[in-house]
Amino acid sequence: MLKSNEVRPGVARHSNSAKTNGDACAKPSPPHPVSTMPAWLYDALEVALSCRGLGWKFGVGVHVPREQRSLEPTSFLSATLISFVKNYLIFDILESFIKLVPEVGTPQGGTIFKAELPSFHRYALSTAIHVATGSCILAGFKLIYDLVTIISVLLLGSSPSSWPPVTDHPWHSDSLHSFWSKHWHQVLRETFFVLGGFPGKFIAGNLGMLFGTFIGSGLYHEFAAYTLGRGFDTLVPLFFALQAPLLLCEKGWC
């Protein structure tokens, strides 16, 4: 695994003109942190924990959300701790609410449309569950990322600039393209490339990479849910696979 400024492991190219990411908000990768652990161990942990590949070749071109926190370590850690506590409480409250609905909060699952309720109450409940589930997932991503950020900066000596926000205000998305490429998290970007994007590109070029990436994403999500013992649900891979033709339609329309 090469860093963005390396020609081979441990050997940097003699140029400062290369950008780490293809994004206006991106910053050059920070210098290696002062740490008591071996450099190889720190690099391995950074690749494993950050996932987006910031500062590494496989992360070139990934969108980097604009940082709102101060990059002074103490202030950065304080803001991240507050964010962690806030997202933990939001996640806990929303998950508790979802689990109050019979069957819905169990691994076996159940319908969010309760036929025994009057129409207004039925759709009010289903809408509340829908919004709560999406918000719960978002808060869950953030609280785990906040925890990893605190550990990395406080204990491993990582630079705050190496840990920009994990999402970029997904509610502000005005298109499928902006949602998937910028506003939603990019943590599993390389994973989906490996599972489907790169094989798809080998078969059918850029079009194959587009379809392969979303098919890989769908299979990744469904096989994760498969471990709950509910069998294989084809609707989940279908949902993600449909994103590819919808993106093509969006591009053609715009």
Image (cartoon, rainbow, N blue to C red):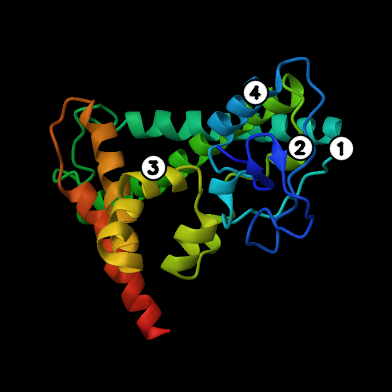
Using the image, tell me which numbered label, if any, was put on residue 133.
3
Q: Which residue is mark 2?
A: 160
Q: Give the number of the mark in front: 1 or 4.
A: 4
- Could you say whether the residue bearing mark 2 is in a helix, strand or loop? helix
154 and 109: which is toward the camera: 154
Q: Amino acid at mark 4?
A: Trp
Question: Label 1: which residue?
Answer: 72
At mark 3, the secondary structure is helix
Q: CA distance from mark 4 to mark 3?
A: 39 Å
Image quarter hosting the C terminus: bottom left
User: Residue 157's x, y, as percent?
Assistant: 77, 25
Mark 3 surroundings within 10 Å by alpha-carbon count, few (fewer than 14), some (14 through 19), many (20 or more): some
Looking at the image, residue 20 lies above or below residue 159: below
- Of the two numbered discs 2 and 3 on the same chain, state the one appearing first in sequence: 3
Residue type beneath disc 1: Glu
What's under tag 2, amino acid-wise?
Answer: Pro
